[in-house]
Image (spheres, grey):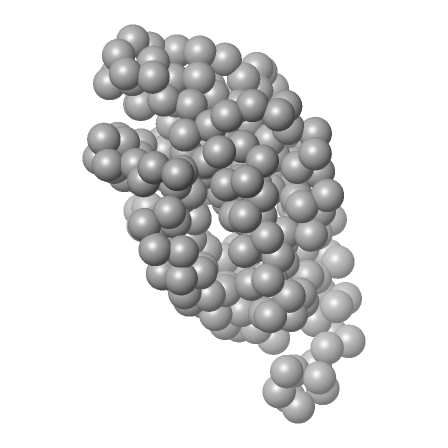
Amino acid sequence: MKPTDLAIAPLVAVQALAVKALASRMPEAEGPRHGEIGTGPALRILIAGDSSAAGVGVRTQAEALAGQLTAALSRHHRVDWFLHAKSGATTASTLRRMRLVPKRGFDVALVALGVNDAKNGVRAGAFEARYHRILNQLRDDFGVRRVYLSGMPPGDLVPVMPNPLRDLLIGRLEHFDRMLQRIAAARGGTAVHLPFDVTRDPYLMAADRFHPGPRMYAEWASLAAAAIHRDAVHLPRH
């Protein structure tokens, strides 16, 4: 951490609490968190992560990431899916909660984690080590053959908030996204970094300007579905 970061740490802590209070007002999306949909070659997928994976910002899971992703994949596959996500989740809390996932096999996983680690001031080295442990757990306990690491949101989607918090958060998100790219590269063909390359329009976000709205979830799901479908026939074998 830079000396300037230490100097502004008290102010950032106060501002971060205000942002957390704003972001926590919206509930997770309602609806089923597992199921089967579609016809075609079987594809078992685990979706894991934080509030964005849990669908905060929309009313139902059908409008959220999981519902729109599985709907898109169902055009080509018989999708057996399970959502394991919670608002406020970090790499540390996800490691603890993974034991709640039913012990069964999945072909692929989509992981959306990192924003809370970045926002909460988690050290980069700790984040990277925990993320690798999550990937190891997905491989060893659930047989996942490829994991898609959802990238951090770009700076122009970071909500309006006072500086220096906003600039500091943007910088940390960019740094954590580079770490995700490095993590994926280190895992060979078993991990893929998926850039958060959606339309960069804050008005496509939810009312709290912190979580995606329905159209942004749809774009995110479409990007993930295209990558997963493209790679499905080339999944690495254990």
Answer yes or no: is residue 14 visible.
yes
Q: In which quarter of the image is residue 56?
A: top right
Q: Identify which residue, 37 or 103, lies in the foreground.
A: 103
**If the image is split into quadrants, where does the N terminus sit?**
bottom right
How far across and down, in percent of the image, does residue 130 sit? Answer: 62, 57
Q: Residue furthest bottom?
A: 3
Above or below, comparing residue 138 to residue 106 in the picture: below
Vertical placement of residue 90 versus 204, above or below: below
Does residue 74 appear in the picture of this structure? Answer: no
Instruction: State whether residue 161 is above or below residue 217.
Output: below
Decide if residue 78 is on the left or right side of residue 132.
Answer: left
Residue at the location (69% across, 52% down)?
92
Q: Percent position (x, y) of residue 79? A: 38, 17
Q: Position of 99 compared to 186: left or right? A: right
Report the side of 12 relative to 56 (left or right).
right
Q: Looking at the image, which residue is at 48% across and 70% down?
A: 175
Q: Residue at x 62, y 87 (%)?
A: 2
Image location (x, y in percent) of residue 113: 55, 49
What residue do we see at 49% from left, 57% from top? 158
Q: Residue farthest to the front?
A: 238
Q: How many labels does the image show?
A: 0
The residue nearer to you, when weighing 177 against 129, is 129
What percent of the width, then of the height, locates residue 162?
A: 61, 67
Q: Which quadrant would the C terminus be assigned to in this image?
A: top left
Choose top left, top right, bottom left or bottom right for residue 85: top right
